[in-house]
Amino acid sequence: MLSLLSNEGSMSARQGLASLNQKMDTTRAQIASGLKVQSARDNGAAYAIATRVKSDQMSQGVVQNNLSRAQSIVDVARGSAETITDLLGQMHERAPMLNDTSLSPEALQSVRDDLNALNSQLDSTAKTSDFNGINLLQTSGKATKNWGRPYGGIVGGGSSYVNYDAGNGAGRMDFYLNLHNVNSANVNIDWGDGSQYTFNYSSGPAFTDNKVIQHDYEAGWDNHTMTYSISASGPGGAGGTSGFHIPGVNFIPADTTEITAYASGETVSMTHKPMGSADLGLNDLNSLDAATVLSTVEAALSTTLDSAAYFGTLQNRLERMSASSVKRADVLETAHGDLVDADLAKQSALWQADQTQQSLIQQSLAIANSAPRVLLQLFN
């Protein structure tokens, strides 16, 4: 039907053109950005998943940087440990010469001078083997955590329950316990990591004993809390000369450097292997006789060989972890791309098809808009 007041063909063409233009805007945006999902408005579910994957990807990047730094630290330590081992090998070659009675005093002093020079070089190597401020051939410098006496003196015939929080790092707890003139004692310690210590004495003559009860903690526990319950009594009477006394409790951190090696926050421990002259017992060679010098050098050589082997094993472990981290990062990058990256070949084909369709709709609109002129011809 031809109508002057309504033009259904024009309205249909306008609606089709508006819809197509909106579609072309989306296609143009994907081609320009290379992304099919730029915000939650595009695809809420895909955007949420992609955001989490991107976060994991960024965390994995931090892990890769940490592992690369750890590899460098261990690489420097291993190389220096091998250098120190070589220096000790040279010292081991010269040390037997101190037993040579055919050598003059001057020649023997020359041998000692050579040993001292090699020892000095060894010490310098250990002290300068740091990377990024970390030197695995020196102590980590972690301070011992000390607790004072929980009681002023001997406690007779009582029991106590006290918490000592040592944090969550690896290390050793030293619990000092003195039992004075007791013929009955019950000691129960819960170390907080699933391990317990128990000592019971209920019959026999009274005795006195100073104990150092030790426990090693591994890293990774949320909390190292030691609790104890102790009762002790004897012929001295409660509050007299019978009972128990706790001189103190110490927590000695493990000599390690921790580095985050997993996106979950788990760490890898790099144990320090001190190799300075004093650490190896070589700081006073001049005061040692010939036989002691040789045995000291042999002991130091054995220590450094073990340490060099440890660093080599640790380096291989870090390399495997780094390779695994790279693979995981690649997988995450691919997963993220699958969720948000646009198929540009497909979008290019759609763009050309849409341009053709747009041209056809524009022609259709032009035809529809010319309908009122046909009405004029009917009245001529």
Image: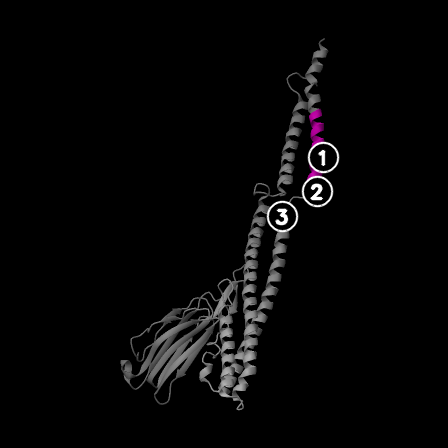
Q: Earlier in the sequence, mark 3 or mark 1?
A: 3
> Is residue 350 rendered magenta in the image?
yes
* Disc sitting over residue 353 in the figure: 1
Q: Position of residue 12 (x, y in %)?
A: 67, 26
Instruction: Please name which of the two marks, 2 or 3, marks the residue nearer to the observer.
Output: 2
Identify the amino acid type marked 1.
Ala
Q: Is residue 229 left or right of residue 140?
A: left
* Disc sitting over residue 339 in the figure: 3
Q: Position of residue 110 (x, y in %)?
A: 51, 82
Q: Which residue is mark 2?
A: 345
Q: Are marks 2 and 1 in contact (CB under 8 Å)?
A: no
Q: How many C-alpha atoms fall within 10 Å of the one at disc 1: few (<14), some, or many (≥20)?
A: few
User: What SS does tag 2 mark?
Assistant: helix
Identify the amino acid type marked 3.
Leu
User: What SS does tag 1 mark?
Assistant: helix
Residue drawn at x 58%, y 52% is 53
The span from disc 2 to disc 3 (Cα, nearest Å) is: 17 Å
Q: Closest to the observer: 255 or 96?
A: 96
Q: Is residue 330 left or right of residue 260?
A: right
Position of the C terminus by quadrant: top right
Identify the amino acid type marked 2.
Ala
Q: Earlier in the sequence, mark 2 or mark 1?
A: 2
